[in-house]
Image: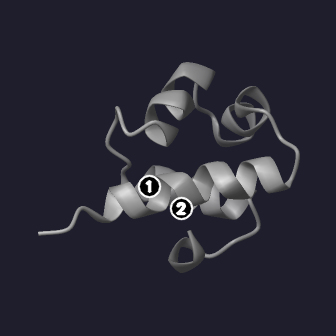
Amino acid sequence: MKNPNRELKPKIKEAREKRGWTQEYLADIVGLSRGHLNRIENDKHELTLKVARKLAYALGLKVEEL
């Protein structure tokens, strides 16, 4: 079975970089540590729906767009 997290994570990084934001900036907006966001983007930590929603909102996207 395909892991949907693997598809979301590069999109999160891409959307963040497209806006010129650092990991620290995005992490601060959504209430994560920079290390936590780094682990999410680099597929070393599971992405929960709650965090995905926060990230999508901060990036001005729908969860479905991530």
Q: Residue at x 73, y 26 (%)?
A: 24
Q: Where residue 27 sits in the image (x, y, percent)?
A: 67, 34
Three-letter amino acid code at the position of disc 1: Lys
Q: Residue at x 79, y 33 (%)?
A: 22
**Mark 2 element type:** helix
Three-letter amino acid code at the position of disc 2: Arg
In the image, is 19 to the left or to the right of 44?
right
Q: Nearer the viewer, residue 45 or 29?
A: 45
> Is 36 situated above or below 56?
above
Residue wearing tag 1: 50
In the image, is 3 to the left or to the right of 61?
left
Residue neighbourhood size for the residue with mark 1, other residues' Cα within 10 Å, grouped as few (<14), some (14–19), many (≥20): few
Q: Residue at x 76, y 67 (%)?
A: 60
Q: Which residue is drawn at 86% across and 53% down?
A: 19
> Is 16 situated above or below 57?
above
Q: In which quarter of the image is residue 66?
A: bottom right
Q: Where residue 46 sits in the image (x, y, percent)?
A: 32, 43
Quarter of the image with the N terminus in it: bottom left
Q: Where residue 65 sits in the image (x, y, percent)?
A: 59, 77
Contact (Cβ within 8 Å) of mark 1 with mark 2 = yes
Residue wearing tag 2: 53
Q: Quadrant of residue 44?
A: top left
Q: Which of 35 and 42 is in front in this view?
A: 42
> Is 2 situated above or below 23?
below
Residue that sits furthest to the left in the current view: 1
**Mark 1 element type:** helix
